[in-house]
Image (cartoon, rainbow, N blue to C red):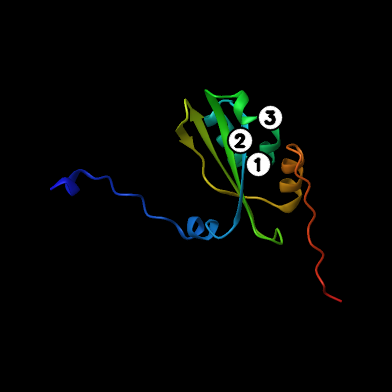
Amino acid sequence: MFGLFKKKAPEETALEKRLRDLKLRKISYVDTDFDEFTRMMRSDVKNWLKLKPVNYYATKREYIMGSVYTTPDYSENYVSFERYEQERRTHKSEIYQIEFDLLSKALAKVGIIITQPVSEEQ
């Protein structure tokens, strides 16, 4: 009887299933107009660099959480964003595929230095 009122979880896409197997890093950013930011990201993913990183504990009320997914060799990289208000998610972006160069610059802004492994093709 009570199963009638239970919300069904949305179907998981193949990409979302793939992301579960990748390494995840979460980064907090200063809150901004989320709709405008996602519109800019759809036109050019380099707009990610415009976000300002912030210590999580400095922004208790409103912040944007970036989730960065990577393979060990950085051949596949993805990022998605969620806006939080009062510790509740209010908005969620789509998942964007990013290149290694952009990933390297974005992570360097928060003090994470990465280098792409050298392939052993000779």
Q: Residue 98's mark?
A: none
Q: What secondary structure is marked by label 2?
A: helix
User: What count of labels does the image hold?
Assistant: 3
Mark 2 or 3 closer to N-term?
A: 2
Residue 24 image offset from top left, x and y in percent: 60, 50
Q: Residue 52's mark?
A: 3
Q: Residue at x 66, y 38 (%)?
A: 48
Viewed as shown, does residue 45 lie left or right of 95? Answer: right
Which callout, 1 or 3, points to the residue nearer the camera? 3
Determine the image quadrant of residue 33. top right
Q: What secondary structure is marked by label 3?
A: loop
Q: Residues within 10 Å of mark 3 (few under 14, many from 20)?
A: some
Q: What secondary structure is marked by label 1?
A: loop
Q: Nearer the viewer, residue 106 or 27?
A: 27
Q: Residue 44's mark?
A: 1
Q: Residue at x 55, y 24 (%)?
A: 60
Circle 1: residue type: Asp
Extreme-bottom residue of the structure: 122
Which callout, 2 or 3, points to the residue nearer the camera? 3
Q: CA distance from mark 2 to mark 3?
A: 15 Å
Residue 96 image offset from top left, x and y in percent: 59, 48
Circle 3: residue type: Lys
- Give the labeled residue for mark 2: 40
| Pointer 2 with pointer 1, Cβ within 8 A | yes
Q: CA distance from mark 2 to mark 1?
A: 6 Å
Q: Is residue 115 above or below residue 53?
A: below
Name the image quarter holding the C terminus: bottom right
